[in-house]
Image (spheres, helix red, strand yellow):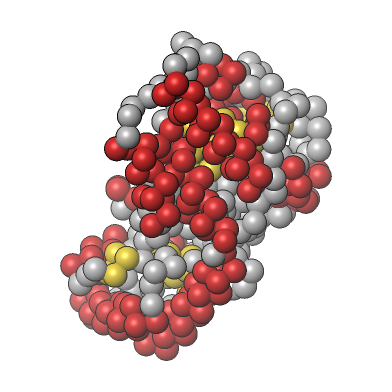
């Protein structure tokens, strides 16, 4: 199998297994326990918190460990907004674990404004400025889009809404680009370990010291009551090792991914024409390539490629089980034929040019076959 769905998850890096091994095979201990084993676990936990904070431009007490970005996003959105009435501003290009909580807040009485993106998938600061009202309570804009790779100018957007709570979903950005939490200036920022080669089931919410957060869970003093429950030391240590390794290899991996992305685009634009790029032509995440193949249906193309040993997606892993057309591409105003024929190709650092050559050949063959069967003139 050739995995072109790396945005869904990355395999744990070798450094992760090495870091976690003592905590998976050694004496078990709860980091809240007062005895020697508990203190040992607490030390490892707090050392990881300090290192993560340093890697992300935050203070250690601004790190709240969670089960992943879905929990982090929910904790931020419900914890920041308070009680209705009030206004929330976001966009339909957000991940479902942001869109769906905001839709729930709308059902509870909040007014929601969905900012329209540009055809390349960007949120324009002027649109945000025009949407602000005295009733605005919360703005939520992601950093790197999970389907198109568009990287938003969060600092510019934040400057427009400087006095408001501002949440940023950075699950597709952390570990893939340098992040400085304080420089971004947002209130909260979410991340998920498995997106950058850490273990699944662990993530974090960065919470600015000046921000008050209403917890979602109750039942313990851990993490100052902001997210009670026994902290999973092995997962936290593993996620820290993954972020350290990812940032150490950042420049080399990003150059490698950019070369593979260009190779994939060049080959498919020749062998599978007509093909359209969805998202920014330059300046986006080098590991994401979203393409439309007119004359093919996204769901049929995904399944046909799967049978040929190439793994792709039609959108985020959290929403693609239904194989519905991408809500992100639809919100960008693309023609129906574009979003009904789109797939996301996302690349991992372990891919080689040979993998890309093979995948390009298979994709071109499958696209040609499906177009012939569909009898639809592209």
User: Taking 175 as reference, is 303 left or right?
Assistant: left
Image coordinates for residue 198, horizontal then vertical, percent:
43, 49
State the residue lying farthest toward the bottom: 270
Name the residue rendered at 47%, 18% in the picture: 32
Residue at image position (54%, 38%) is: 48
Quadrant of image for the N terminus: bottom left
Q: Is residue 203 visible?
A: yes
Indicate whether 210 appears above or below 311. Answer: above
| Residue 297 percent across, percent down from the top left | 31, 65
Say which quarter of the image contains residue 272. Answer: bottom left
Q: Nearer the viewer, residue 219 or 34?
A: 34
Q: Residue at x 62, y 73 (%)?
A: 282
- Residue at the location (56% across, 22% down)? 223
Outermost residue to the left: 307
Residue 9 image point, x, y percent:
39, 53
Q: Nearer the viewer, residue 239 or 310?
A: 239
Q: What quarter of the picture does the C terminus occupy?
A: bottom left
Residue 139 appears in the rendering: no
Which quadrant of the figure has residue 136? top right
Task: Give the answer, above or below, for where 12 lies relative to 309.
Answer: above
Residue 70 vs 5, above or below: the answer is above
């Amino acid at each position: 199998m050739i995995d072109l769905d790396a945005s869904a998850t990355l395999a744990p890096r070798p450094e992760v297994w090495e870091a976690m091994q003592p905590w998976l095979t050694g004496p078990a201990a709860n980091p809240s326990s007062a005895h020697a084993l508990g203190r040992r676990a607490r030390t490892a936990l707090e050392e990881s918190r300090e290192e993560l904070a340093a890697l992300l431009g935050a203070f250690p007490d601004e790190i709240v460990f969670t089960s992943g970005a879905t929990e982090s996003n929910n904790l931020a959105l419900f914890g920041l907004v308070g009680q209705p009435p009030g206004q929330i501003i976001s966009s339909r290009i957000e991940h479902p674990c942001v869109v769906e909580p905001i839709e729930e807040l709308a059902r509870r009485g909040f007014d929601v404004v969905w900012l329209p993106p540009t055809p390349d998938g960007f949120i324009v600061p002027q649109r945000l400025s025009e949407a602000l009202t005295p009733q605005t309570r919360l703005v939520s804009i992601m950093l790197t889009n999970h389907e198109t790779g568009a990287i938003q100018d969060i600092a510019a957007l934040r400057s427009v809404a400087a006095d408001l709570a501002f949440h940023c979903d950075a699950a597709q950005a952390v570990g893939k680009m340098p992040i400085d939490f304080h420089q971004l200036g947002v209130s909260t920022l979410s991340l998920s370990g498995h997106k950058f080669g850490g273990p699944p089931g662990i993530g974090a919410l960065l919470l600015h010291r000046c921000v008050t957060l209403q917890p979602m869970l109750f039942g313990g003093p851990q993490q100052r009551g902001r997210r009670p429950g026994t902290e999973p030391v092995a997962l936290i240590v593993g996620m820290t090792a993954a972020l350290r390794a990812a940032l150490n290899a950042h420049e080399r991996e990003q150059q490698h991914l950019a070369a593979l992305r260009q190779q994939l685009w060049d080959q498919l634009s020749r062998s599978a024409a007509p093909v359209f790029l969805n998202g920014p032509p330059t300046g986006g995440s080098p590991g994401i390539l979203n393409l439309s193949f007119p004359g093919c249906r996204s769901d049929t193309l995904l399944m046909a490629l799967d049978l040929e040993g190439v793994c792709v997606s039609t959108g985020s892993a959290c929403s693609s089980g239904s194989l519905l057309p991408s809500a992100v591409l639809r919100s960008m105003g693309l023609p129906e034929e574009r979003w009904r024929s789109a797939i996301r190709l996302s690349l991992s650092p372990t891919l080689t040019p040979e993998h890309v050559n093979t995948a390009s050949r298979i994709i071109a063959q499958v696209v040609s076959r499906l177009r012939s069967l569909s009898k639809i003139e592209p």
